[in-house]
Image (cartoon, grey):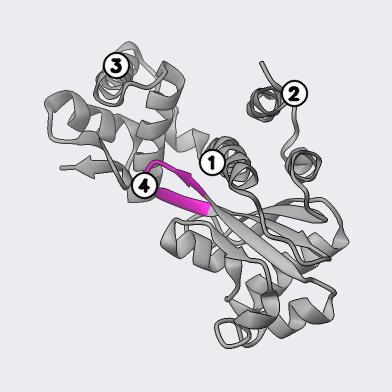
């Protein structure tokens, strides 16, 4: 296992507190600072982790202006790569000048997603002009994927009262549906259960209701080029 794989495993373990996500990004990438934030209406806009005060300030600017790389990463589902932020004054007329005044030369954002569900973004900044190499972009995307799952789990814990069903029948239905999703998407049992929870959370329905639909064949999950999509 190389250093990057160890970092991914470390990020995915409960031994790493969410507040420490940003420092792991800074350690692994040639950047000045980083932040992890939820963005938008589903979970709300909030900084989960920031490597320093400037990283947190950049998040606040984007929340206040409702523009910037994190919003674009969430809306497009793709990384936003800005080696020279001065060139984006037209795209981000409020955020770009404010970021420049803060000393930012380059900024990058990678979406946090679990399946089809957008959660937020990882923001990376540099005080000197920087172009991320293809290897660094791949590392940032991989770390964002792991962090996204952890952030969603944290959000779902706040809704656990709704999703935790009691009684043998409810548990059987959910376990059966987890097995179906596992087979459909070739996932681990943990990730298959997370897909069920995610779909329930995003549609405002209970996990039990979604599980019944999956077992009945009314709801299917399919892996496509654009990600995991829901059919039914």
Q: Quadrant of the N terminus?
A: top right
Q: Residue at x 15, y 42 (%)?
A: 232
Q: Residue at x 36, y 15 (%)?
A: 167
The residue tagged 1 is 152
- Secondary structure beneath dot 2 equals loop
Which of disc 2 and disc 3 is earlier in sequence? 2
Magenta segment: 112-119
Q: CA distance from mark 4 to mark 2?
A: 27 Å
- Whether residue 56 is situated above or below residue 152 in the rendered picture: below
- Whether residue 63 is situated above or below residue 176 in the rendered picture: below
- Whether residue 86 is situated above or below residue 10 in the rendered picture: below
Q: In the shown orientation, is residue 135 left or right of residue 195? A: right
Q: Nearer the viewer, mark 4 or mark 1?
A: 4
70 or 157: nearer the eye?
A: 70
- Secondary structure beneath dot 3 equals helix
201 or 195: nearer the eye?
A: 195
Q: CA distance from mark 2 to mark 1?
A: 17 Å
Q: Are marks 2 and 1 in contact (CB under 8 Å)?
A: no
The residue tagged 3 is 179
The extreme left residue here reads 217
Numbered badge on residue 15: 2
- What is the x, y in percent for residue 200? 35, 40
The residue tagged 4 is 116
Which of disc 2 and disc 4 is earlier in sequence? 2
- Secondary structure beneath dot 4 equals loop
Q: Quadrant of residue 158?
A: top right
Which of disc 4 and disc 3 is earlier in sequence? 4
- What is the x, y in percent for residue 208? 30, 30
Which of disc 3 and disc 1 is earlier in sequence? 1
Q: CA distance from mark 3 to mark 2?
A: 28 Å
């Amino acid at each position: 296992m190389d250093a990057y794989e160890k970092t991914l495993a470390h990020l995915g373990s409960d031994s790493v507190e969410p507040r420490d996500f940003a420092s792991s990004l800074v350690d692994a990438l040639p950047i000045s600072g980083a932040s992890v934030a939820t963005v938008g209406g589903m979970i709300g806009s909030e900084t989960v982790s920031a490597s320093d005060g400037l990283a947190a300030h950049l998040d606040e600017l984007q929340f206040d202006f409702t523009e910037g790389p994190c919003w674009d990463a969430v809306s497009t589902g793709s990384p936003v790569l800005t080696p020279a932020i001065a060139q984006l004054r037209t795209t981000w007329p409020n955020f770009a000048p404010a970021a420049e005044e803060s000393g930012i030369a380059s900024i990058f954002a990678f979406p946090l997603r679990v399946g089809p569900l957008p959660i937020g973004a990882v923001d990376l900044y540099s005080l000197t002009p920087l172009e991320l190499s293809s290897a660094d972009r791949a590392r940032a995307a991989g770390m964002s994927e792991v962090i996204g799952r952890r952030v969603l789990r944290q959000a779902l814990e706040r809704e656990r009262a709704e999703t935790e069903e009691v009684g043998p029948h409810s548990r059987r239905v959910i376990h059966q549906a987890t097995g179906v999703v596992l087979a459909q998407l070739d996932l681990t049992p943990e990730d298959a259960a997370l897909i069920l929870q995610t779909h329930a959370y995003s549609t405002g329905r209970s996990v039990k209701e979604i599980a019944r639909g999956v077992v009945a064949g009314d709801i299917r999950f399919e892996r496509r080029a654009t990600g995991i999509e829901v059919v039914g």
